[in-house]
Image (cartoon, coloured by chain):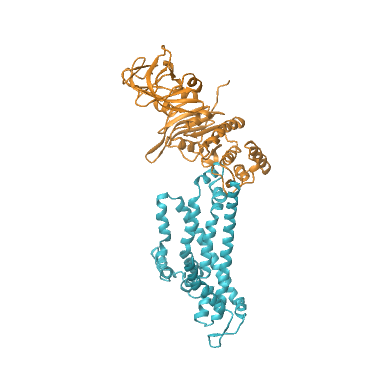
Amino acid sequence: MAPALAWLTALMVVPCALVLALAFFQRGIYGGIEYTFTLGNFGLVFDPLYAGIFLNSARIAGTATLVAVIIGYAAAYAIAAAPRRWQPAFLFFAVLPFWSNYLIRTYAWIVLLNREGLITQLLRWFGYTGEPPSMLYTEGAVIAGLVYNYLPFVILACYAPLSRLNPELAEASRDLGASAMTTFRRVILPLTVPGIAAGAVFVFVLSIGNFVTPALLGGGRFQMIGNLVYDQFLTANDWPFGAALAMALIAIMLIVLMAQALAADRAAGRIAEARGGADG
Amino acid sequence: MSAPRTLLAIDRVSKNFGRVTAVDGISLDIRENEFFALLGPSGCGKTTLLRMLAGFETPNDGRILLDGRDIARTPPNKRPVNLMFQSYALFPHMSVRANVSYGLEMERLPANEIRSRVDAILATTELAAFADRKPEQLSGGQKQRVALARALVKRPRLLLLDEPLGALDKKLRGAMQLELKRLQHEVGITFVIVTHDQEESLVMADRMAVLRDGKLLQCDTPHAVYEYPANRFVADFIGVMNFVPGKATTDGVLAANGARISGTVPATLSPGAAAIASVRPERIRLFPSPETANRIAGTVEALAYQGLDLQLHVRTALSPKPFLVRVTADAADRRPVASGDAVELGWDAVDVRIFAD
């Protein structure tokens, strides 16, 4: 326990505290840091220009989350419905992209989406002769990259409750007169919501702070908070403001994570309470 | 009494999964308001047959006529048949009331009618006090009653029960057997129960079908199946039976040691054919009168006192396995026996059943 705590302190708590401290100082005139206390950096976060980037990031991350949940849930459903002996193989293929580097996976999308990339060539092969579609450096490209990179998390998170679901529950619903659609809506979906929530939080938190995908697939035209923080530290040389932005980002992530933990806790609490009732 | 009306006619139904034949050309009639049991060892096809009645499997061949209409291809949500699952399959995220209301909501009945029908069935199954509980908050017996209420509230033409008492402990099971029978009488719905427990079907069923390897072996009242088993398998599967292997004669079986067991030989058995004579333990007397048709000397190997009666294992020259004999407590008191005692066993020719071996 103690070594773990030491590692956590050295590698997480201390760096975060340093960044937090940085956010309360002023930027020097020629870059660097002037050690004068100020709250101005946090005030600037709420400037419409930067608040807009926050909102934009949340919107892109939210869209990516929605798309990833829909595709990931469908994939998890299909895997859970497949014959038992095939399921490990399907899960293996679902997480296979994780074996290569995030950057490489994102570069692969450039090869796909480029003006004369694979998708355009495929269209040409089908007889398309017009202008190549502009796909790279669009918001759609950024969302596609985020969805692709985080989809395995959703598949795994949704597969767990789906594979544990007693198949007789769906049969009982059908037996009682429900259609397949009603059975999904009233029995299967409510019982697998915890998996969806866990997967969604994963995608959202990882997406909203992402700066590699918007930089590579958005071509710098679509700034997200991650890029902004990156720019403040490495281009604008305004470390205090960059630190304030980073703290604001961490705060958003914490709120989302805590909300999910609280909801999961309450769900678990209901079950525990229910179990206690049966024992008493 | 008017002739019982056939509710469900299973007509030469077969089902195979790949190369495995689960149900092999079974024909059965189930009558209106009957408590019917499908009995057999695991893998005999009884569950597959039940799932075809519920609509979860489609027969490869044959018809399933409910009130004269073929429902073999009707989806489960479109037939007036309900199934009580072995796992109960209660919806864990819904209260008892929501579970029971679910089926009526699917029929799009008015809210007040749903409420009154659910209240009525919760009262019948003594669940009114638990209406707001979740399934996890219920005991095994209570869950079983919720599953039953959820199926019964739909007022199906036919209620299917898949090993309904399998998950309960032995004592509760006995009570629930009688409870189920009372309830069936009260609601006037035809019950078809699947079980591997022969005792359970003897106690509960009006009529029962014994299945093995996808085939129907015998379909009759519990009394007829117990007293007049159709073949050696049924005789062995239902209750306890003593067997004496040998060869058929005109008036019985000639055992390997030369002893003659007299009994009625079925017409299908020609003299000299391999045959097996059988007799129930409760039909055997210790120290029989000299005019008893079948008598054999033996040695008591073991005794098992069971309160109501005494079970003896008696080694004889007739069969490799010891004879099982049930002696009433009363008779045992009058003439006590101990392990190692030499005794004589006797039974009447009318109590002997002879089968092809």
Q: Which chain is cyan?
A: A
Q: Relative to B295, is B182 on the left or the right?
A: right
Q: Relative to A263, is B208 on the left or the right?
A: left
Percent position of residue B61, x then y: 43, 35
Residue shown at 46%/65% (left/top)?
A: A149
Percent position of residue B88, x then y: 54, 42
Residue shown at 46%/53% (left/top)?
A: A78
Question: Of A130 and B328, which appears nearest the observer?
Answer: B328
Eyeballing the image, is B146 above or below A159? above
Q: Colour of chain B?
A: orange
- Outermost residue on the right side: it is B112
Eyeballing the image, is A13 above or below A126? below
Question: Of A97 and A9, which appears nearest the observer?
Answer: A9
- Outermost residue on the top side: it is B291
Eyeballing the image, is B238 above or below A273? above
Q: Is residue A188 visible?
A: yes
Question: Of B310 and B87, which appears nearest the observer?
Answer: B310
Question: Of B73 and B271, which appears nearest the observer?
Answer: B271
